[in-house]
């Protein structure tokens, strides 16, 4: 089942209280344990969208992709431009994480810098049709 997941920047030296001005909104399939579901993703790729919001830098829109390689044999990534390699952002061990409120995940930005995010919302987001996710 597809879910709408919101991540906010977690505590860090630069942001001791974290920041809701930096984060991601992700639509992705989760299994009953709250983990990314690769089988369902393969059937619903066109609905697996990502919106990155980064304070004053504005928004970036991309898709959630699953690629061979990396830890565990595959890597979950955000691809912002499918026609241009090198702009992807990888998640650290996202295949192992449970996407539940209060948990943390780490994303690597396109410059290779890791950032930790707290999961602040997870809600069911079944689309009504292809237009619902665009």
Image: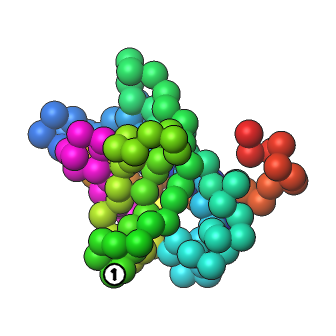
Q: Is residue 47 magenta?
A: no
* Helix, strand or loop for disc 1: helix
Q: Nearer the viewer, residue 10 or 94?
A: 94
Whole-percent x and y of residue 103?
38, 64
Colouring of the image:
rainbow
In the picture as drawn, the residue positioned furthest to the top comes out as 56
| Visible residue check, residue 110 | yes
Q: From which residue to which does the magenta span run? A: 102-114
Residue at point 77% right, 60% down?
126
Q: Determine crowd level at label 1: few under 14, some 14-19, many 20+ residues with C-alpha closer than 10 A.
A: few
Whole-percent x and y of residue 63?
56, 49
Residue at point 45% right, 22% down?
58
Residue at point 44% right, 66% down?
67
Is residue 20 placed above or below 34 in the rendered structure?
above
Is residue 62 placed above or below 21 in the rendered structure?
below
Is residue 13 placed above or below 128 in the rendered structure?
above
In the picture as drawn, the residue positioned furthest to the left comes out as 13
Whole-percent x and y of residue 1?
71, 70
Is 111 positioned to the left or the right of 128 in the image?
left
Q: Nearer the viewer, residue 74 or 4?
A: 74
Q: Nearer the viewer, residue 50 or 116?
A: 50
Question: Which residue carries the number 1 mark?
Answer: 72
Q: Is residue 110 magenta?
A: yes
| Visible residue check, residue 11 | no
Q: Nearer the viewer, residue 98 or 84?
A: 84
């Amino acid at each position: 089942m597809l879910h709408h997941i919101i991540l906010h920047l977690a505590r860090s030296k630069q942001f001791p209280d974290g920041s809701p001005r930096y984060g991601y909104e992700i639509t992705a399939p989760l299994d009953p344990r709250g983990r990314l579901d690769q089988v369902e993703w393969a059937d619903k790729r066109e609905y697996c969208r990502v919106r990155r919001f980064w304070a004053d830098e504005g928004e970036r829109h991309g898709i959630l992709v699953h690629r061979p390689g990396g830890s565990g044999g595959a890597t979950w990534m955000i691809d912002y431009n499918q026609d241009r390699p090198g702009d992807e952002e990888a998640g650290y061990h996202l295949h192992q994480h449970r996407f539940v409120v209060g948990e943390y995940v780490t994303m690597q930005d396109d410059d290779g810098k890791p950032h930790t995010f707290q999961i602040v919302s997870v809600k069911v987001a079944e689309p009504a049709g292809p237009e619902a996710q665009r």
